[in-house]
Amino acid sequence: MSSGQDFQNQVRERGNIPPALHIFQQFGDLSPIEPHSRNLGHFKVEGPIMRLKLNHRDSLVSLFQAALDTQWKLHFISSGKNWGLGSFLPSIGHTLIVDLSALNSLKLNLDEGVALIQPGVTQQQLYDELKDTQWFANITTSSGSTSVLGNALQKGVGLWRQRHHDILGLRVLTSSLGEISTGALKFDEANPRNYADHAGPDLTGIFMQSSLGVVTEGLLKLNIKPRKFYIFRIDFNEPVFLQAVHLLKFLYQIGTLACVSRIYENASVASYDGAKLEDLHGQSFTGYFCIPDHGQKTYTLDDLRQLADSYGLPQTFIRQLDPDQEGLAPLEKSICGCYQGNPAFNDRMIESSFNATATTMDEASSKGWLTVLPILPLNGEALTNARKIVGEFRTRYGDFGMLFAFTMNIIEPNAVDFVVSLRFARTEEAAELAHHAYSELYTRFAECGYLPYRVDTQRQDFLSSITHPSSLKVGKALRSIFDAQNVLASSSHAS
């Protein structure tokens, strides 16, 4: 019997928390979790795990000591909605999952355009605070109940840029050095500014995708609201794929586009809108981008159509959307809202796609879901190669009920977040085969030089294999400085 199973049997027999772990109950609500607890990606952890919903930030120092005394590792989560990449699970067993969702303090400085937020602040909470101001936040199309700071620390991709670029400074509690302030919080902590490049080295970056400490606050840069958001939809099919890519790249190069453009293949659109994938015929694409009107001259719909025509694209290639229009599909409604910093429509899209709510996603979703997130250059060759890879996997695994789809998030003129999703039946047999395909996808993209910007909670060996030895050496050295006694569970982005 495994240590995880033995631990769970003890819990069931005694009907409470094992005595050795009672020490954690003083910090908040404590509960055991099955080692193979149901989660959207069907990830598994070997060994016992517990979950603690932390009540107060001030308890963290004592929590570190309790972890040392019990020899349990700590794994911190903001909301636990890391869907497709491990959800709430740590990378190893004998780990206490520390839920920081109750730490949800939010302070706005409307003169500077910044928000000082704790890990529990959600996308919806931030929008509610900003909706009557001149500012809006860079958000994702994920649930309104997801953490702003948690996703930013994982370098998530919002609708205006990758979100770690929104972070101006951090407050981090480490087990070895106590509290550290970085970036814009390094000097003037009483009234932080919308500026982070002060004299001296900045440590902000080393606490992203790492397990060197627990981030307790972050200073977030906000966006000024334009006079109007002009949101455009583009539709094209396979024969003009390269022309569409070249046009979008040009619009980024000349500065017309500063948002993240999103391009969905028809299989991806159907999955988000709850349609049947088997009813699709051929391959077509639907994309979205936003041009804000701040009073300067911007491209109009007619301008864009003339430009599209010069690239050999039809007049029907582009049209302007009215976000308030009746009958918009869930995906379209979500994107229109998110460009304006409003996540209110995201959960409807999630429900149509997964037949579950954000709260019940891990347990109740009708399909399992995994994601691979390679970064590609924005050129025809790379995107064609990536699409061929997805095609290969559809051919190899399609008969086993797996559904592969991709979305292209154009982050900047030279970078595309090429999101590959893998859906599968929620059975042990299907999940095992899906994880086999999932590992192969990581390897296949890496062999082509397309490396991920973010990996799942159990991809440590893979990430080590593609990381330069000197970087791994530095990571270990940093770990010995900030967490000398190994209180924190290792991250997949191991440092």
Image: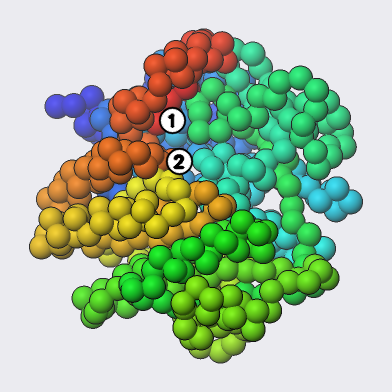
Q: Nearer the viewer, residue 372 or 383?
A: 383
SS type, badge 1:
loop
Q: In the figure, 388 relative to 304: above or below?
A: above
Identify which amino acid the numbered label 2 is placed on.
Tyr
Earlier residue among tags 2 and 1: 2
Q: Is residue 192 left or right of residue 286?
A: right
Query: Is 289 left, or right, of 355 in this rendering?
Result: right
Checking the image for residue 493, the label placed there is 1
The vertical placement of 179 against 437, above or below, is above
User: In the rendered view, would you say 260 is above or below 469?
Assistant: below
Disc 2 secondary structure class: loop
Residue sitting at 63 percent across and 62 percent down?
Answer: 257
Residue on which disc 2 sits: 453
| Amino acid type, callout 1 | His
Quarter of the image where the N terminus is located: top left
Q: Residues within 10 Å of mark 2 (few under 14, many from 20)?
A: some
In the image shown, does 338 or 240 lie closer to the viewer?
Answer: 240
- For marks 2 and 1, give the one nearer the viewer: 2
In the visual, does 269 lie left or right of 64? Answer: left
The quarter holding residue 200 reads: top right
In the rendering, at what x and y percent does residue 113 appear? 81, 51
Residue 108 image point, x, y percent: 80, 50
Q: Residue at x 33, y 57 (%)?
A: 384
Q: Position of residue 429 (x, y in %)?
A: 12, 50
Residue 482: x and y, percent?
57, 15
Residue 407's mark?
none
> In front: 237, or 427?
237
